[in-house]
Image (cartoon, grey):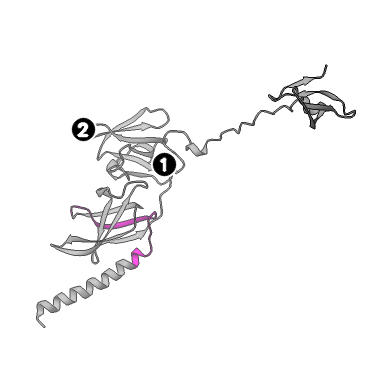
Amino acid sequence: MSGHTARRHAEQYENGQNMTTLDAALMKITAGDYVTARGTDTRGHEVTRTGTLLAPPQKVKAQFGGRKEDAVRLCIGLAGTDPSQRSTWTTLFPDFGFVEPTRKPTSNDWTNGPLSKVPGMRTADEGVVVRFGGKGGKRSTEPAKPALARIRHVDNGRYEIRDVATDEVLLTVAWQTAIWWAPAPEDETGDGEPAADEHEVPVEEAPPVPPAQARRGVLYEGWLSAEEHTELGRAVLHLTSGRVIGWLTTDGQFRPAA
């Protein structure tokens, strides 16, 4: 066996061992979990992403170190993002990358960092809703009074941070401007209104139906005779005496006796 072949076999063995390790890590996560993963983006640059695993892991062939390698693609981003968005793709290789479950941050976990690091900013067309605590930076030591706000791209690389309740512009920033932000509470819809199926709709009671008034008609005043028929119709007999009190015509009308 040549030296080149031996090295190649050794690499294959090592890659196999590393893939086994990666597979073991993948078995600990499932779509919908909150995870942190380190790998490469679609341009081959190293990237670390934290967010919701948007879809099951997918085995792929990807370029690494100048050649195609077995790899695993993870789609990680803001919950609800379409996993076909390439900006969510994170590719893990047997000897480069990791993934692990991560505690999901709460609305009290504040971050002082660039706007570009807010999850979902690259993929959300309608903007991202966060708890906004004012402008950040090295000199800012704590957030200001927080407000639920929506961050939306305006134009020329500028972004407006608007109060969800009043639509007031709280701050206009650039992509790398540092801000204080925390995840919005999960029960917030961004428009101050509960979801449609959460509205309490009063049950309208049907109006009471008045009892039907007693009707006095031919069937309440006599019996229909089974035998007596005349040109006037079918005889109607008195309930007690049996005498003819009238006739029921062929068109259903009662004609009283004279």
- Which residue corresponds to mark 1? 184
In this view of the protein, which residue sits in the foreground, 171 or 2? Answer: 2
* Identity, as a three-letter code, of the amino acid under mark 1: Ala
The reply to whether dot 1 and dot 2 touch (C-beta < 8 Å) is no
Give the mark nearest the N terminus, 1 or 2. 2
Residue pictured at 27% horizontal, 69% vertical: 19
187 vs 167, left or right, is: right
The segment highlighted magenta reads 24-43
213 vs 74, left or right, is: right
Residue sitting at the far bottom: 1
Question: Helix, strand, or loop for circle 2?
Answer: loop
Question: Helix, strand, or loop for circle 1?
Answer: loop
The circle drawn on residue 50 is: none
- Which residue corresponds to mark 2? 156
Residue 137 percent location from the top left of the image: 30, 40
Dot 1 crowding, Cα within 10 Å, few <14, some 14–19, many 20+: many
* Identity, as a three-letter code, of the amino acid under mark 2: Asn
